[in-house]
Image (tube, helix red, strand yellow):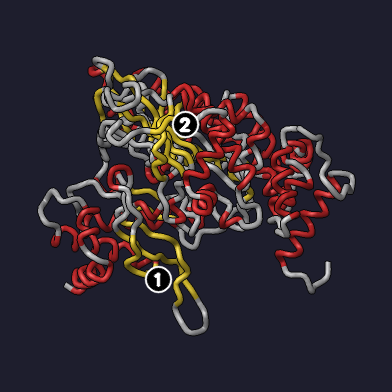
């Protein structure tokens, strides 16, 4: 190739040539009218007809649909060959992400609806991580699991091995509907209004078995929250179903419904907003399907930054969008009059750690604190055995990057805690560690500007000594603007940045620091407090903010989020600086 091309141009041309070669040098996609991909092709054609320019990803989908390319993935694996950019995008339809230059290897992301696993599936994943990965598992902020450091030669093997376990990775990346999340304590929670597992599972299988729901304008998130003690962060999803109880005499039949919320994307500083619509639980999958169809037809295919549901809602307004959904449903949506639903039960920010009584008499769930979501194979097998021998055989992943063992009898709680401790884990955590969340960071992601997991551990170590606190606190570290660890909803959020250190343009890893975010009943987007804090200085800067909070809170019971909202950013900066100078 000519040296006049940029690196990005070279990569694009390589991917384009590979796509043409795979389709016999065809110049246009072969598409049967009325086939499962037709709506996507029609949307692309409308964009071009209107003078728009499709993104590279849309072009790659035209050249060769990822689900038609599996034989090439197998062939590449046999050669132990890394993918070109177009195939790196395509293989994400199988859950495979080639993460060079951070690692010259694949990461596999699973699909685990509602975060529910059997003990034997969990142990099986430990085997896969040991045989074909880097020897560890990561629990993610979507109640999911990632296996990392997979050699290209094992790409197809690990996808197939996951399926052998009765699990899935299909559609867990790229322009698809991601893992369907739900209340972690579904079915065992004393305060829940509804068990979300059947609805998350139904939505999961609806997606798996309908090819027309792949190849959206961009990724899409769906969550079901049953109003249990541990939240599902449904208001950070494109579609959020919130369990509510309708009251007698308010214009709707009494009973439990899902309140429909739309447009959550906290990385773009927006929570899902209440639509005023109530959905009967048995109709949730159908309503979600029609929302997706409207998005497929009208989402932006010219800009990756604007290709999320939020931007369709911003352009159209909610009423126009809901009218389009109703047209596809062939019936009106149920609108909730003012005062129709009762207030939802509050979440418990500490219920994901420790032993808690289930709704079933004599049984408990036990929340296990994981070190920033990381598990060794030995720990994974050990937890699987505890779930099998002392619990009901099941495990639940949470959005807080930890795991629950369910169905533990009262007399076995102490034995389970001892067995967990023997694995080097614990069912107890300080308020700082219990709410500490970090994405993969520069260790395994090419976008990240900082090593978030390492830095999160340093922050916890320092703050537990320099600024211990006595109330729940959430500290979220994310490596880049993609906000995988949702830094905008943390009490304190850190987003990776390259920090200038001289006039020659040299930089080091660091963070911008925010404060005042919240979720659930306290939902809010955090405000930036400090820019360009070096990673080595971040622990003391976070500690100084916590000391300022302890000194300036109105009383011992005032949560951090209330303190942060009582003060503007400049005041918090000043209070933090004062703590450092003491």
Q: Which mark is residue 333?
A: 2
Q: Which mark is residue 532?
A: 1
Q: Which sits in the foreground, 151 or 498?
A: 498
> Left of 477 or right of it: where is 72?
right
Q: Where is residue 49 shown, x and y percent of the image?
A: 75, 54
At a point 58% along the width and 27% down the height, the residue shown is 206
At a point 24% along the width and 62% down the height, the residue shown is 545
Q: Where is residue 146 shown, x and y percent of the image?
A: 52, 40
Q: Check the image and report above or below for 120 versus 344.
A: above
At a point 22% along the width and 72% down the height, the residue shown is 574
> Left of 469 or right of it: where is 57?
right
- In the picture, residue 325 is in which quadrant? top right
Can residue 427 be seen by looking at this rendering? no
Query: Helix or strand or loop: what does disc 2 sit on?
Result: loop
Q: Which sits in the foreground, 326 or 559?
A: 326
* Number of the front mark, 2 or 1: 2
User: How much space separates mark 2 and mark 1, taking CA atoms?
Assistant: 48 Å
> Left of 35 or right of it: where is 373?
left
At a point 28% along the width and 28% down the height, the residue shown is 417
Q: Quadrant of the C terminus?
A: bottom left
Q: Where is residue 282 shown, x and y percent of the image?
A: 47, 21
- In the picture, residue 14 is in which quadrant? bottom right
- In the picture, residue 74 is in which quadrant? top right
């Amino acid at each position: 190739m000519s040296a006049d091309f940029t690196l990005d141009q070279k990569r694009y041309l390589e991917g384009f040539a590979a796509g043409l070669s795979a389709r016999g040098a065809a110049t246009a996609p072969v598409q049967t009218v009325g086939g499962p991909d037709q709506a996507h092709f029609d949307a692309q054609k409308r964009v071009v007809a209107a003078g728009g320019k499709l993104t590279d990803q849309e072009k790659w989908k035209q050249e060769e649909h990822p689900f038609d390319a599996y034989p090439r993935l197998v062939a590449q694996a046999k050669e132990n060959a890394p993918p070109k950019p177009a195939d790196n995008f395509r293989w994400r339809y199988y859950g495979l992400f080639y993460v060079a230059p951070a690692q010259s290897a694949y990461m596999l992301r699973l699909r685990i609806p509602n975060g529910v696993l059997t003990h034997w599936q969990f142990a099986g994943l430990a085997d896969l991580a040991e045989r074909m990965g880097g020897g560890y598992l990561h629990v993610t902020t979507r109640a999911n699991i990632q296996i990392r450091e997979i050699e290209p030669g094992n790409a197809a093997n690990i996808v197939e091995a996951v399926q052998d376990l009765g699990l899935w990775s299909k559609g867990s990346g790229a322009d698809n509907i991601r893992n369907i999340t739900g209340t972690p304590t579904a079915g065992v929670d004393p305060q829940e209004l509804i068990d979300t597992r059947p609805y998350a599972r139904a939505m999961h299988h609806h997606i798996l078995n309908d090819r027309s729901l792949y190849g959206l304008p961009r990724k899409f998130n769906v969550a079901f929250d049953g109003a249990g003690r541990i939240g599902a962060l449904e208001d950070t999803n494109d579609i959020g179903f919130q369990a509510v109880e309708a009251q007698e005499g308010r214009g709707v039949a009494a009973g439990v419904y899902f309140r429909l919320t739309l447009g959550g994307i906290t990385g773009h500083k927006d929570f899902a907003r209440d639509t005023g619509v109530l959905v009967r639980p048995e109709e949730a999958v159908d309503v979600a399907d029609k929302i997706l169809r409207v998005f497929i037809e009208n989402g932006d295919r010219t800009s990756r930054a604007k290709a999320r549901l939020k931007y369709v809602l911003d352009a159209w307004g909610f009423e126009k969008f809901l009218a389009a959904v109703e047209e596809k449903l062939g019936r009106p949506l149920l609108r909730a009059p003012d005062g129709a639903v009762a207030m939802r039960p509050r979440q418990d920010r500490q219920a994901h750690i420790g032993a808690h009584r289930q709704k079933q008499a004599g049984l408990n769930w036990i929340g296990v604190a994981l070190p920033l979501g990381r598990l060794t194979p030995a720990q994974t097998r050990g937890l699987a055995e505890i779930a099998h021998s002392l619990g009901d055989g099941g495990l639940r992943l949470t959005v807080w990057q930890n795991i629950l063992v369910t169905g533990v009898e009262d007399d076995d709680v102490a034995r389970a805690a001892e067995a967990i401790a023997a694995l080097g884990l614990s069912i107890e955590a300080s308020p700082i560690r219990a709410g500490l969340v970090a994405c993969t960071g520069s260790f395994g992601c090419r976008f990240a500007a900082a090593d978030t997991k390492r830095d999160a551990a340093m922050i916890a170590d320092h703050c537990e000594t320099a600024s211990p606190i006595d109330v729940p606190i959430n500290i979220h570290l994310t490596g880049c603007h993609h906000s995988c660890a949702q830094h905008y909803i943390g009490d304190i959020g850190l987003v990776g940045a390259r920090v200038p250190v001289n006039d020659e343009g040299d930089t080091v890893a660091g963070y911008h620091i925010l404060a005042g975010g919240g979720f659930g009943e306290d939902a809010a987007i955090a405000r930036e407090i400090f820019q360009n804090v070096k990673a080595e200085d971040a622990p003391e800067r976070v500690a100084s903010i916590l000391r300022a909070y302890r000194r300036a809170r109105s009383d011992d019971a005032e949560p951090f989020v209330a303190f942060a909202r009582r003060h503007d950013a400049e005041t918090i900066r000043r209070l933090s600086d004062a703590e450092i100078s003491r």
